[in-house]
Image (cartoon, helix red, strand yellow):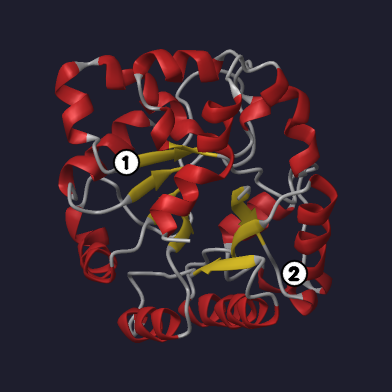
Amino acid sequence: MKVDFHIHVTPDDLIRDYKGIYEKEPYWALLSESPNNRFANGEAVIADLDNSGFDVGVVTGFSFRDLGLCKYVNDYTIELVKKYPDRIVGMMAISPKERGYEAEFARCIDAGLVGVGEMFLSGQGLNPFERDDLAGLMGLSKEADIPMVIHSNEPVGHNYVGKVEITPKEIYNIALNFPKNKLVFAHFGGGLPFYELMRELSSSLSNVFYDTAAGIYLYKPEVFRVLREIGILDKILFGSDFPLLSIVRYKSYFEKSGLNSEELGLVLGDNACKLLNL
């Protein structure tokens, strides 16, 4: 089964009036104004899966600071899961500093969502060095046995919209604070996978996974050979970051990766199926 683990979905009316919440959500405004920004509804997700020959897409709405907006996009994700039960797997957007987030978490679990998806710590006012900022949500996620996807980026290289101080240093601290949680650090974990060569780090990252979202902008295809040599291909999850990038944009990327068919199978779906119990 081929799985795209990292897809963003947006309700149609929010796409039409995406500027209407700028004042309330400055991080949304920042990303929305990027010349590379794209929006996609559920039907666009299905079309991209079909066009690329993928079976399942893991989708999430935008992780707003406002819990009401999180609920709104979660409603849309829940409806998509109901409409396309064999094609769409949903993750929840949640804001753990907002009153009532626990009830929204429970509602999403009851509705069949299987993870917390992509947390924007900077945009949501969450400090990766303040354990209490995430402790409540981590506790709920651990109890529900679901993964949490957290945005991360590399501390070097070119600047781009959304590149913030959520680097390997910050996300490693999260992994240390919550060693029993299933964590997925997006965008190759900002380079954290390479530090798994350090003996002291590899053991403390045993429950950590990394997705490849926007990877073709960041690393040469040879990155997969390096990850194979490190011995962590079983922790790598293909994510396109659609609609920023369509799945087909990765075709030549994986053709040049140097991985054999079995190894590609792990990255392109087997690892995600195991993590999400698909």
Q: Quadrant of residue 55?
A: bottom right
Whether residue 255 is situated above or below residue 239 in the rendered picture? above
Residue linked to disc 2: 42
Q: CA distance from mark 2 to mark 1?
A: 28 Å
Whether residue 60 is situated above or below residue 67 in the rendered picture? above
Q: Residue at x 31, y 19 (%)?
A: 195
Image-based side of 4 in relation to 119, left or right = right
| Comes first in the chain, label 2 or label 1 | 2
Q: Position of residue 26 (x, y in %)?
A: 58, 59
Image-based side of 159 in relation to 200, left or right = right
Whether residue 154 is situated above or below residue 23 in the rendered picture? above
Say whether residue 17 is visible: yes
Q: Residue at x 61, y 76 (%)?
A: 81
Image-based side of 181 in relation to 222, left or right = left
Outermost residue on the front side: it is: 262
Whether residue 232 is situated above or below residue 73 in the rendered picture? above
Comparing 82 with 70, the one in front is 82
Q: Amino acid at mark 1?
A: Val
Q: Residue at x 53, y 20 (%)?
A: 224
Label 2: state its secondary structure.
helix
Comparing 115 with 268, the one in front is 268
Say whether residue 121 is visible: no
Q: Position of residue 204 (x, y in %)?
A: 18, 34
Q: Amino acid at mark 2?
A: Gly
Q: How many marks?
A: 2
Q: Position of residue 94 (x, y in %)?
A: 43, 70
Residue contact between numbered discs 2 and 1, judged by CB atoms under 8 Å: no
Answer few, some or many: residues within 10 Å of disc 1's Cα (few below 14, many 20 plus, some between 14 and 19): many
Q: Which mark is residue 208?
A: 1
Q: Residue at x 23, y 63 (%)?
A: 142
